[in-house]
Amino acid sequence: MIFPTLSPDRRACARLSGLTVKIDIPVNVCYSDGSMQHYGEDGEPANRKAPRGRTKKRPSPLQVKRALETISSSLEAWRKLRGLTQAQLASRAGLNRDTIVRLEKGDGGVSLENLLLVLRALGLQDLLPKALDPYESDIGRLRADEQLPQRVRPRSLKGSDA
């Protein structure tokens, strides 16, 4: 097996069974150890793949943070009104206690399914669908007789002169 090392002049050296062989190739293009792993200038393996997904979490708008706080405090209040511990609620919902803790802290990363499981365990599973029903709002009642389109296309930003 070949192990790269750095010489003082920042050129690659290979060591094989105690023998050191100097190679006149810059370190940043040197490959080694049979797996064709790339080694950077610092002599450490370099990861060439870009990280998947978002690397930084973008901040939530203030209204979203407030809604998370309201929902989390309401869930905690409902749990206490029912006389349940976090562990008991987690058991009833079929979740881990850590998920209940995250919900009650207002962590926005908890899935919608887990929220619905907790609402079901608290006997509140019908409240969220009713709250989101478009026909329970003023706009929904005004437009109830209209047929909803199969697909919504973006409106043109230009004035309609046609």
Image (cartoon, rainbow, N blue to C red):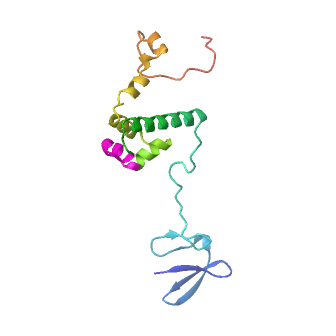
Residue 140 place in picture, x, y as percent: 45, 15
Residue 127 place in picture, x, y as percent: 39, 27
Q: Is residue 56 magenta?
A: no
Q: How many marks?
A: 0
**Magenta part of the chain:** 86-97
Question: In this rendering, would 25 be left or right of 103?
Answer: right
Closest to the observer, 57 or 74 = 74
Q: Residue furthest bottom?
A: 18
Query: In what quadrant of the picture does the N terminus appear?
Result: bottom left
Residue 4 place in picture, x, y as percent: 55, 78
Closest to the observer, 79 or 68 = 79
Question: In this rendering, would 68 be left or right of 130?
Answer: right
Seen at 53% across and 90% down, the residue is 19
Seen at 44% across and 36% down, the residue is 77
Closest to the observer, 65 or 121 = 121
Residue 144 image-quadrant placement: top left
* 162 to 53, vertically: above or below: above
Residue 27 image-quadrant placement: bottom right
Closest to the observer, 15 or 122 = 122
* 28 to 94, vertically: above or below: below
Give the main secondary structure, helix, strand or loop, of the magenta stretch: helix
Q: Is residue 92 magenta?
A: yes
Seen at 54% across and 61% down, the residue is 48
Residue 66 image-quadrant placement: top right
Q: Residue furthest right?
A: 9
Residue 71 place in picture, x, y as percent: 48, 34
Query: In what quadrant of the picture does the C terminus appear?
Result: top right
